Amino acid sequence: MPTETKFDSEGFDLGASNEAEVIYEIGGGATSPPPVKKTDGDNDKTKQSNSPIAESERLKELGNDEFRQQNHLDAYDYYTDAIEACPMGVGMGPTGKELLQLRDEFDEQQRERQAERHRRDMERRRGGGDKKDGEDKKDDDDNNDEEGEEEGGPTEFIPPRHTYGDKLAVYYSNRAATTLHLGRYEEAIEDCDVALLYNPTYVKALMRRCTVNERIDNTEGALRDAKRAYELDPTNKVARKNVSRLQKIEEERLEKLKEETMGKLKDLGNSILGNFGLSLDNFNAVQDPNTGGYSISFNQNKS
Protein backbone atom coordinates (compact mmCIF):
# COMPACT_ATOMS: atom_id res chain seq x y z
CA MET A 1 0.00 0.00 0.00
CA PRO A 2 1.56 3.31 -1.01
CA THR A 3 2.57 5.67 1.76
CA GLU A 4 0.67 9.01 1.78
CA THR A 5 2.99 11.95 1.44
CA LYS A 6 2.24 14.81 3.80
CA PHE A 7 3.04 18.44 2.91
CA ASP A 8 3.53 21.23 5.43
CA SER A 9 5.61 24.33 5.75
CA GLU A 10 8.25 22.71 7.90
CA GLY A 11 11.50 22.16 6.01
CA PHE A 12 10.74 24.86 3.36
CA ASP A 13 12.98 27.91 3.08
CA LEU A 14 10.17 30.44 2.66
CA GLY A 15 12.64 33.27 2.64
CA ALA A 16 14.93 31.68 0.11
CA SER A 17 14.01 34.12 -2.62
CA ASN A 18 12.57 37.58 -2.96
CA GLU A 19 11.32 36.79 -6.47
CA ALA A 20 7.61 36.50 -7.12
CA GLU A 21 7.96 32.82 -8.12
CA VAL A 22 9.64 30.12 -5.89
CA ILE A 23 9.62 26.40 -6.70
CA TYR A 24 9.12 24.33 -3.53
CA GLU A 25 10.48 20.78 -3.54
CA ILE A 26 9.25 17.63 -1.75
CA GLY A 27 11.22 17.04 1.39
CA GLY A 28 12.06 20.71 1.93
CA GLY A 29 14.15 23.34 0.24
CA ALA A 30 13.28 25.86 -2.41
CA THR A 31 14.65 26.64 -5.80
CA SER A 32 14.60 30.18 -7.17
CA PRO A 33 14.48 30.80 -10.94
CA PRO A 34 17.54 32.43 -12.51
CA PRO A 35 17.59 36.22 -12.37
CA VAL A 36 15.81 37.91 -15.26
CA LYS A 37 17.99 40.16 -17.37
CA LYS A 38 16.82 43.76 -17.71
CA THR A 39 15.38 44.65 -21.08
CA ASP A 40 15.81 47.90 -22.98
CA GLY A 41 12.43 49.00 -21.63
CA ASP A 42 13.69 48.54 -18.08
CA ASN A 43 16.78 50.55 -18.94
CA ASP A 44 14.58 53.32 -20.37
CA LYS A 45 12.60 53.46 -17.12
CA THR A 46 15.84 53.70 -15.16
CA LYS A 47 17.03 56.52 -17.38
CA GLN A 48 13.69 58.32 -16.92
CA SER A 49 13.89 57.98 -13.16
CA ASN A 50 17.41 59.46 -13.26
CA SER A 51 16.37 62.31 -15.57
CA PRO A 52 16.60 65.87 -14.15
CA ILE A 53 12.92 66.35 -15.02
CA ALA A 54 11.67 63.00 -13.68
CA GLU A 55 10.03 64.72 -10.72
CA SER A 56 8.44 67.35 -12.98
CA GLU A 57 7.02 64.63 -15.22
CA ARG A 58 5.64 62.75 -12.22
CA LEU A 59 3.95 65.90 -10.91
CA LYS A 60 2.55 66.66 -14.36
CA GLU A 61 0.90 63.23 -14.51
CA LEU A 62 -0.63 63.79 -11.07
CA GLY A 63 -1.95 67.11 -12.36
CA ASN A 64 -3.42 65.37 -15.40
CA ASP A 65 -5.20 62.86 -13.15
CA GLU A 66 -6.73 65.66 -11.08
CA PHE A 67 -7.72 67.59 -14.20
CA ARG A 68 -9.55 64.56 -15.62
CA GLN A 69 -11.53 64.42 -12.39
CA GLN A 70 -12.25 68.16 -12.77
CA ASN A 71 -10.28 68.97 -9.62
CA HIS A 72 -8.89 72.09 -11.25
CA LEU A 73 -7.40 73.70 -8.14
CA ASP A 74 -5.46 70.55 -7.26
CA ALA A 75 -4.37 70.19 -10.89
CA TYR A 76 -3.17 73.80 -10.83
CA ASP A 77 -1.00 73.09 -7.78
CA TYR A 78 0.55 70.00 -9.35
CA TYR A 79 1.38 71.82 -12.59
CA THR A 80 2.91 74.66 -10.58
CA ASP A 81 5.02 72.14 -8.65
CA ALA A 82 6.09 70.56 -11.95
CA ILE A 83 7.26 73.97 -13.21
CA GLU A 84 9.15 74.71 -10.00
CA ALA A 85 10.79 71.26 -9.97
CA CYS A 86 12.23 71.75 -13.46
CA PRO A 87 15.94 72.76 -13.51
CA MET A 88 16.55 76.46 -14.24
CA GLY A 89 19.45 78.86 -14.37
CA VAL A 90 22.96 78.67 -15.83
CA GLY A 91 23.35 75.87 -18.33
CA MET A 92 19.58 75.26 -18.46
CA GLY A 93 17.69 78.42 -19.37
CA PRO A 94 15.49 81.24 -18.03
CA THR A 95 12.38 80.96 -15.89
CA GLY A 96 8.98 81.88 -17.25
CA LYS A 97 9.03 85.15 -15.31
CA GLU A 98 12.42 86.04 -16.76
CA LEU A 99 11.19 85.31 -20.29
CA LEU A 100 8.22 87.64 -19.86
CA GLN A 101 10.50 90.37 -18.52
CA LEU A 102 12.89 90.00 -21.46
CA ARG A 103 9.97 90.15 -23.92
CA ASP A 104 8.51 93.26 -22.28
CA GLU A 105 11.91 95.00 -22.32
CA PHE A 106 12.31 94.20 -26.02
CA ASP A 107 8.82 95.55 -26.80
CA GLU A 108 9.59 98.75 -24.90
CA GLN A 109 12.80 99.23 -26.87
CA GLN A 110 10.87 98.76 -30.12
CA ARG A 111 8.33 101.40 -29.06
CA GLU A 112 11.14 103.83 -28.20
CA ARG A 113 12.79 103.27 -31.59
CA GLN A 114 9.52 103.83 -33.40
CA ALA A 115 8.89 107.04 -31.43
CA GLU A 116 12.41 108.25 -32.23
CA ARG A 117 11.93 107.57 -35.97
CA HIS A 118 8.62 109.45 -35.86
CA ARG A 119 10.28 112.39 -34.06
CA ARG A 120 13.04 112.61 -36.68
CA ASP A 121 10.51 112.47 -39.51
CA MET A 122 8.55 115.33 -37.96
CA GLU A 123 11.70 117.43 -37.52
CA ARG A 124 12.70 116.75 -41.11
CA ARG A 125 9.30 117.92 -42.38
CA ARG A 126 9.21 121.04 -40.23
CA GLY A 127 12.80 122.12 -40.91
CA GLY A 128 13.11 121.05 -44.52
CA GLY A 129 12.16 124.43 -45.99
CA ASP A 130 14.73 126.42 -44.00
CA LYS A 131 17.81 124.44 -45.09
CA LYS A 132 20.00 124.76 -48.13
CA ASP A 133 20.19 121.87 -50.56
CA GLY A 134 23.63 120.74 -49.35
CA GLU A 135 22.69 120.84 -45.66
CA ASP A 136 19.42 119.02 -46.32
CA LYS A 137 21.24 116.25 -48.20
CA LYS A 138 23.83 115.87 -45.41
CA ASP A 139 21.11 115.60 -42.72
CA ASP A 140 19.22 113.04 -44.79
CA ASP A 141 22.39 110.96 -45.12
CA ASP A 142 22.99 111.13 -41.35
CA ASN A 143 19.42 110.11 -40.61
CA ASN A 144 19.59 107.25 -43.06
CA ASP A 145 22.76 105.98 -41.36
CA GLU A 146 21.06 106.07 -37.95
CA GLU A 147 17.96 104.32 -39.27
CA GLY A 148 20.14 101.69 -40.91
CA GLU A 149 21.80 100.93 -37.60
CA GLU A 150 18.43 100.59 -35.84
CA GLU A 151 16.83 98.51 -38.57
CA GLY A 152 19.77 96.09 -38.45
CA GLY A 153 18.45 94.61 -35.17
CA PRO A 154 15.67 92.03 -34.85
CA THR A 155 12.11 93.29 -35.25
CA GLU A 156 10.63 90.31 -33.39
CA PHE A 157 11.59 89.03 -29.96
CA ILE A 158 13.63 85.82 -30.14
CA PRO A 159 13.52 84.14 -26.69
CA PRO A 160 16.59 82.36 -25.32
CA ARG A 161 16.30 78.59 -25.42
CA HIS A 162 15.82 76.31 -22.42
CA THR A 163 17.13 72.74 -22.30
CA TYR A 164 13.67 71.49 -21.33
CA GLY A 165 11.69 74.22 -23.11
CA ASP A 166 9.30 71.78 -24.81
CA LYS A 167 8.44 70.17 -21.45
CA LEU A 168 7.98 73.51 -19.72
CA ALA A 169 5.68 74.63 -22.54
CA VAL A 170 3.44 71.65 -21.73
CA TYR A 171 3.43 72.39 -17.98
CA TYR A 172 2.49 76.05 -18.54
CA SER A 173 -0.11 75.23 -21.18
CA ASN A 174 -1.69 72.62 -18.91
CA ARG A 175 -1.81 75.12 -16.06
CA ALA A 176 -3.48 77.58 -18.42
CA ALA A 177 -6.20 74.98 -18.98
CA THR A 178 -6.93 74.98 -15.23
CA THR A 179 -7.10 78.78 -14.95
CA LEU A 180 -9.33 78.84 -18.05
CA HIS A 181 -11.80 76.55 -16.27
CA LEU A 182 -11.47 78.64 -13.10
CA GLY A 183 -12.29 81.83 -14.99
CA ARG A 184 -8.87 83.37 -14.26
CA TYR A 185 -8.39 84.51 -17.84
CA GLU A 186 -5.50 86.93 -17.29
CA GLU A 187 -3.42 84.16 -15.72
CA ALA A 188 -4.38 81.79 -18.52
CA ILE A 189 -3.20 84.28 -21.16
CA GLU A 190 0.11 84.78 -19.35
CA ASP A 191 0.75 81.03 -19.01
CA CYS A 192 0.01 80.54 -22.71
CA ASP A 193 2.41 83.39 -23.49
CA VAL A 194 5.16 81.67 -21.50
CA ALA A 195 4.41 78.31 -23.12
CA LEU A 196 4.80 79.89 -26.56
CA LEU A 197 8.02 81.64 -25.55
CA TYR A 198 9.44 78.25 -24.60
CA ASN A 199 8.03 76.59 -27.72
CA PRO A 200 6.79 79.07 -30.39
CA THR A 201 5.32 76.26 -32.54
CA TYR A 202 3.24 74.64 -29.78
CA VAL A 203 -0.18 74.43 -31.43
CA LYS A 204 -2.07 73.41 -28.26
CA ALA A 205 -0.94 76.57 -26.49
CA LEU A 206 -2.04 78.69 -29.47
CA MET A 207 -5.45 77.03 -29.51
CA ARG A 208 -5.81 77.48 -25.76
CA ARG A 209 -4.92 81.16 -25.94
CA CYS A 210 -7.34 81.52 -28.84
CA THR A 211 -10.13 80.21 -26.59
CA VAL A 212 -9.20 82.57 -23.75
CA ASN A 213 -8.99 85.57 -26.08
CA GLU A 214 -12.45 84.85 -27.40
CA ARG A 215 -13.77 84.56 -23.84
CA ILE A 216 -12.56 88.09 -23.10
CA ASP A 217 -13.96 89.40 -26.43
CA ASN A 218 -10.52 89.86 -27.98
CA THR A 219 -11.57 88.42 -31.33
CA GLU A 220 -8.62 90.05 -33.09
CA GLY A 221 -6.15 88.16 -30.86
CA ALA A 222 -8.21 84.97 -31.06
CA LEU A 223 -8.23 85.10 -34.87
CA ARG A 224 -4.48 85.73 -34.96
CA ASP A 225 -3.84 82.66 -32.77
CA ALA A 226 -6.21 80.49 -34.81
CA LYS A 227 -4.51 81.51 -38.07
CA ARG A 228 -1.07 80.76 -36.65
CA ALA A 229 -2.21 77.36 -35.35
CA TYR A 230 -3.72 76.48 -38.74
CA GLU A 231 -0.55 77.66 -40.49
CA LEU A 232 1.53 75.33 -38.30
CA ASP A 233 -0.90 72.41 -38.61
CA PRO A 234 -3.07 72.54 -41.77
CA THR A 235 -4.65 69.21 -40.76
CA ASN A 236 -6.11 70.74 -37.59
CA LYS A 237 -9.85 70.87 -38.32
CA VAL A 238 -10.67 72.80 -35.15
CA ALA A 239 -8.17 75.52 -36.07
CA ARG A 240 -9.60 75.74 -39.59
CA LYS A 241 -13.16 76.09 -38.28
CA ASN A 242 -12.04 78.71 -35.76
CA VAL A 243 -10.38 80.76 -38.50
CA SER A 244 -13.54 80.74 -40.60
CA ARG A 245 -15.86 81.50 -37.67
CA LEU A 246 -13.69 84.17 -36.05
CA GLN A 247 -13.06 85.87 -39.41
CA LYS A 248 -16.79 86.53 -39.76
CA ILE A 249 -17.07 87.76 -36.18
CA GLU A 250 -14.11 90.09 -36.63
CA GLU A 251 -15.49 91.50 -39.91
CA GLU A 252 -18.82 92.20 -38.20
CA ARG A 253 -17.01 93.87 -35.29
CA LEU A 254 -15.00 96.11 -37.61
CA GLU A 255 -18.10 97.07 -39.59
CA LYS A 256 -19.93 97.97 -36.39
CA LEU A 257 -16.92 99.98 -35.21
CA LYS A 258 -16.83 101.79 -38.55
CA GLU A 259 -20.52 102.72 -38.26
CA GLU A 260 -20.06 103.96 -34.69
CA THR A 261 -17.03 106.03 -35.69
CA MET A 262 -18.83 107.56 -38.66
CA GLY A 263 -21.79 108.37 -36.42
CA LYS A 264 -19.53 110.19 -33.95
CA LEU A 265 -17.80 112.09 -36.74
CA LYS A 266 -21.18 113.10 -38.15
CA ASP A 267 -22.29 114.39 -34.75
CA LEU A 268 -19.05 116.36 -34.45
CA GLY A 269 -19.46 117.80 -37.93
CA ASN A 270 -23.05 118.83 -37.26
CA SER A 271 -22.06 120.53 -33.99
CA ILE A 272 -19.51 122.66 -35.85
CA LEU A 273 -21.65 123.40 -38.92
CA GLY A 274 -24.57 124.24 -36.67
CA ASN A 275 -22.79 127.49 -35.74
CA PHE A 276 -23.28 128.54 -39.37
CA GLY A 277 -26.85 127.30 -39.68
CA LEU A 278 -25.75 124.25 -41.62
CA SER A 279 -25.48 120.49 -41.16
CA LEU A 280 -23.93 117.58 -42.99
CA ASP A 281 -27.30 117.08 -44.68
CA ASN A 282 -26.39 120.12 -46.80
CA PHE A 283 -23.61 118.07 -48.38
CA ASN A 284 -24.05 115.10 -50.69
CA ALA A 285 -21.21 112.59 -51.15
CA VAL A 286 -21.43 110.44 -54.26
CA GLN A 287 -18.93 107.63 -54.84
CA ASP A 288 -17.42 107.11 -58.26
CA PRO A 289 -17.81 103.36 -59.06
CA ASN A 290 -14.75 103.46 -61.33
CA THR A 291 -12.21 105.15 -59.04
CA GLY A 292 -13.77 104.59 -55.62
CA GLY A 293 -13.36 108.31 -54.88
CA TYR A 294 -16.10 110.66 -53.70
CA SER A 295 -17.45 113.90 -55.13
CA ILE A 296 -19.15 116.29 -52.70
CA SER A 297 -21.86 118.75 -53.66
CA PHE A 298 -23.50 121.46 -51.57
CA ASN A 299 -27.28 121.91 -51.27
CA GLN A 300 -28.25 125.23 -49.64
CA ASN A 301 -31.95 124.34 -49.30
CA LYS A 302 -31.53 121.36 -46.94
CA SER A 303 -31.53 122.00 -43.24
Image: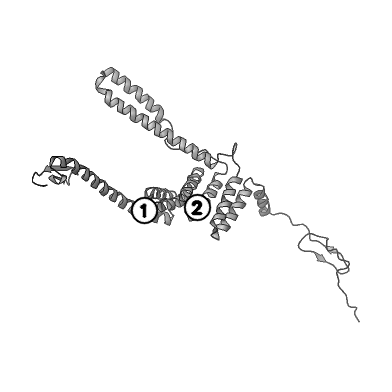
Q: Residue pushed farthest bottom?
A: 1
Q: Position of residue 292 (x, y in %)?
A: 19, 44
Q: CA distance from mark 2 to mark 1?
A: 23 Å
User: Which is closer to the viewer, label 2 or label 1?
Assistant: 2
Nearer to me, 103 or 238: 103
x, y percent for residue 19? 77, 60
Total marks in image: 2
Residue 249 pos. (x, y %):
34, 53
Left or right: 94 as drawn, with respect to 135: right
Residue that label 2 marks: 179
Which numbered tag is attached to residue 246? 1
Q: How many C-alpha atoms fall within 10 Å of the one at disc 1: few (<14), some, or many (≥20)?
A: many
Answer above or below: position of 208 versus 23: above
User: Is residue 162 placed above or below 118 in the rendered structure?
Assistant: below
Work out which quarter of the rendered image holds the N terminus and state it: bottom right
Residue type at mark 2? Thr
Label 2's element? helix
Q: Earlier in the sequence, mark 2 or mark 1?
A: 2
Crowd class of label 2 (few under 14; some 14 to 19; many from 20; radius 10 Å): many
State the image coordinates of residue 96 (x, y, percent, origin top left). Answer: 53, 42
How is this picture coloured?
one colour
Could you tell whether 28 is left or right of 243 in the image?
right
Q: Residue at image x 29%, y 48%?
A: 257
Residue farthest front in this picture: 275
**Residue at (40% x, 50% y) in the render:** 222
107 left or right of 39?
left
Q: Give the secondary structure at mark 1.
A: helix
Residue 233 in sight: no
Q: Is residue 130 visible?
A: yes
Q: Residue at x 32, y 21 (%)?
A: 139
Q: Amino acid at mark 1?
A: Leu
